[in-house]
Amino acid sequence: MNSVQKETIRLYAKQLRLPTFNSYEKIIRQLSAEDGYEQFLIQLMKQELAERSVTGQKRRIKAARFPSPKTLDEFDLTRLENVSESTVRQLASCDFIKQRQNIVMIGNPGSGKTHLSIALGMNACEAGYRVKFYTAVNLAAELAEAVQMNRLSRFEKALNKNELLIIDELSYLTFNRYQSEMLFQVISERSERSSVIITTNLEFSEWTQLFDNEMMLAALIDRVTFRSFVLNMNCSSSYRFDATVSS
């Protein structure tokens, strides 16, 4: 094959947005003498599909806005005193997203709630699901900003495109009535339509410290816990402290 033909292939690959087609020479070298044009084309398309899958995973992980990458392999499952490893593995399959179920992780600080929520979120990204990560404070702030900028509807539509919404650190911070109502609306709209992971230091009975409208709070808990996994993440030692000591 001459240089003109090679340059033409590169040009067409760029215009068609098929960058892996430029690796055709490597594929040719891997084929046997009995393989024909059809096998060459199959291998070429297979490589393009694999590359797109990896690119898509990276794009979804970036769009999720995780504070830092975390994986299940990095998480010491033996630390979970009240959650079985089989439950975690079940959740890691992402079937809960397919079933439009929620996860609520309740536990003391340093129990690994954020790590586990991110790890499950990254699994979901790799499985092809759209994910978005927020701390509860940041989500409330972005909702308030969206109202001020007259783009709340657009922001909510963008949120609803994600099959999994992670709300981290729903803890000792009281939201005003307006923030409570907006958070309630976001979570309520997802009920039985898409999944939410919530991490919190507080038992449900203590959520009155966060939301001053008790009727709305009761409805919120009802929606969050319906068809959900409620994980008791309390443990006797801090995950972060132990990790710091061991390092």
Image (cartoon, rainbow, N blue to C red):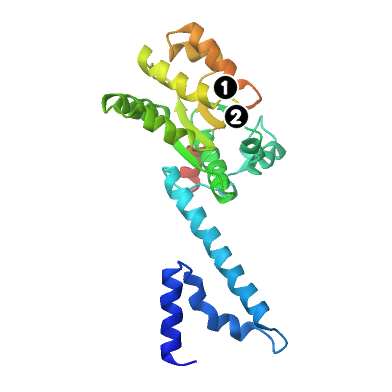
Say if 169 sits above or below 122 in the image.
above
Residue type, numbered disc 1: Val
Residue shown at 51%/29% (left/top)? Answer: 199
Residue 222 in picture, x, y percent from top left: 59, 16
Among the 4 quarters of the image, the one containing residue 232: top right
Foreground: 106 or 178?
178
Q: Earlier in the sequence, mark 2 or mark 1?
A: 2
Foreground: 107 or 133?
133
In-image side of 114 versus 139 (left or right): right
Can residue 233 be seen?
Answer: no
Residue type, numbered disc 2: Asn
10 Å neighbourhood of mark 1: few (<14), some, or many (≥20)? many
Tell me whether circle 2 and circle 1 mark residues in contact (CB < 8 Å): yes
Label 2, on which residue? 102
Residue 226 in picture, x, y percent from top left: 63, 21
Label 1, on which residue? 224
Instruction: Specify the label residue 72 is tagged with.
Output: none
